[in-house]
Image (spheres, coloured by chain):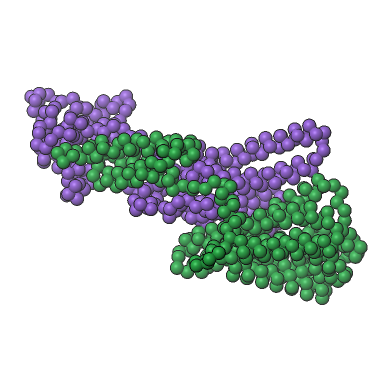
Chain colours: A green, B purple
Amino acid sequence: MANDLLKSYSFRREREQDWRALEAMVAKTDTGGLKALSADEVMRLPGLYRATISSLSVARSISLDRNVVQFLEGLAVRAYFCVYGTRTGLMEALSAFFGVGFPQAVRDARRSIAVSGFVFALGIFAGFQMTAGNEDWFYTFVGTDMAGGRDPSASTDFLRAVLFDEPDSLESLNLFASFLFSNNARVGMLCFALGFAFGVPVLLLLINNGLMLGAFLALYHGRGLLGDLSGWLLIHGVTELLAVVLCGGAGMLLGQALAFPGRHTRMANLAIQGRLAARIVLGAVAMFFLAALLEGFGRQLINDTGTRALVAGTTAVLWAFYFIRVGRRRRHGDDR
Amino acid sequence: MLGPSAQQRRIVTPEGVALTVELAPRGDRAAALLIDLLIIVIALALLTLLVFLIIAASFGRGGGWMLSFILIAAFLLRSFYFVYFELRWQGTTPGKRKMGLRVIDRAGGPLRTDAVFARNLMREVEVFMPIAFLFGAEAGDLFSWLALIWALVFVLLPFFNKDRLRAGDIVAGTWVVTAPKAVLLSDLADPKVALRPLGSARPDGIAFTAEQLAIYGIYELQTLESVLRGTGPDIGETRAAVADRIQRKIGWIDPAAGGRRAEPKVFLEAFYGALRQHLETRMLFGVRRKDKHDKR
């Protein structure tokens, strides 16, 4: 090469074969993903990619052939997608998510979730106290469609009947469960979206729902049915209320990310915290699904308050275990 | 060299090389989304048909099961369709692949799994919730108007920022880019000329002095390259015109033919080779002459 006049020509001649090989491989992955490559090709891919990247650097400095430079730019970008694309499949990603990602995300965001839980509890307490004092507050807190006839003007027998009625068929339970699931999941995701507005709507949403719940509790307490109502609610309520609090926490996290970016720019911080918040909301959606199943099937099939309380207690213990113990990284120096 | 235009962005790969990617046009992204939604709807319709046939075969029992199965399948399908494909095909879905688009990480690193989850979760909020609101809302309600405005803000977000990010891209830290394919054409330099040893004469006898080669810069060289690579019915005339112009500008006379001009294509190829060699040698010394007005 020292004697040649056109160095870029010799340079291309030496390296063109590698570029062609990489181009063929990348064309294969375009149609079939990485699985379309044979084992040998997958072994060669990173080496060829690095060779192409280095050729690109060299070509940019010594070659004036625009076609070569454009070709190498395009090839490098496409090979970059292959080499640095995602490497896990859906099932692996899901098991990694539920095994480690979700519980760890909840632990990482525990302060926001605590705030969210506190605000929600505040709403419940306020709703309960106000409605217990004067039952007319019920109408302010709970809309007529949500109440479905269960308001202060209803008789005690009617209220009791709602808690313990028999289902007419299994099919309507199914429909009910799936409707509830999509409805509750939507509320959860709304919390996430509302986090964009600095977290203020999330607080309002939590307080609103808390007031509704508190009003219901007070209504039934006034008729002496609080114990039965607790069973009716908590059989799925432990899961669902926990999911609501988690979504509220995720929304607060986003709001905080926008309001207090710390060392990063707002956009960068939003991206970082957004990924954490998204993990929490995804897990919460799965929890809503479980809650809907429990609500649709468990609640209407089990009619005894004692059994309902048992199921509720079991779910509480299981969730506590899941979020506290599952997915913890082993600490350095542990001899387990 | 490709200069950065308004829709190009630089990412620095982990090897430290800056690659230029081009942001996808918004229309292409919308089209890709429509194609994907169409596929989902068709899959759902086929599924409904299948379940209906099964119900009919078992004499109509279990109608309630069917409806709730469809509801849940619809939700799962529209949630996991995008995630599944973006994970498996390195950031592209059938609709995106049709339009030639890809999802990449803004920081230049690998596309992470939770980024894929996050950006698709936001789509739930951007696309499906407004659709649900549209179908379920009562007219004139203040809440539904607010919801409509909120939905519009999300849908139009790509128009309000220069990186064309939708809310899902903002949260996940990704871009959607196109990756145009380039074809490697053969080198224009003649191997007999390019590989001859230092100091020897050109085989076709066409020679240029140093002053003649010092007139043009890189821009003219690359324009000449596109003329030489060009195809079409009147490319011969173009080449003749360009050859004529160059000869006039640099004051070149064909020494062998006694005043008769050489063939345009032959002349242009010789000039291209000589000019490229001259400019590349100067480039090795760090002098990059951009065009004929550059005074280096």
Among the 4 quarters of the image, the one containing residue B276: top left
Image coordinates for residue A63, horizontal then vertical, percent: 25, 42
Q: Image check: A138 left or right of A119? A: right
Image coordinates for residue B244, horizontal then vertical, percent: 18, 30
Query: Which of B268/A8 is in front?
Result: A8
Query: Which of A206/B257 is in front?
Result: A206
**Residue at image point 82% right, 47% down:** A170
Query: Which of B293/A231 is in front?
Result: A231
**Residue at image point 55% right, 64% down:** A336
Query: Which of B252/B35 is in front?
Result: B35
Q: Image check: B5 left or right of A318? A: left
Image coordinates for residue B51, horizontal then vertical, percent: 73, 36
**Residue at image point 69% right, 69% down:** A120
Report if residue A333 is visible in the image: yes
**Residue at image point 72% right, 67% down:** A210
Q: Quadrant of the N terminus of chain B?
A: top left
Q: Image check: A191 left or right of A154? A: left
Q: How many marks?
A: 0
Report if residue A244 is visible in the image: no
Image coordinates for residue B33, horizontal then vertical, percent: 55, 43
Q: Image check: B73 left or right of B108? A: right
User: In the figure, B190 relative to A111: above or below?
Assistant: above
User: In the figure, B205 relative to A114: above or below?
Assistant: above
User: In the figure, A175 relative to B201: above or below?
Assistant: below
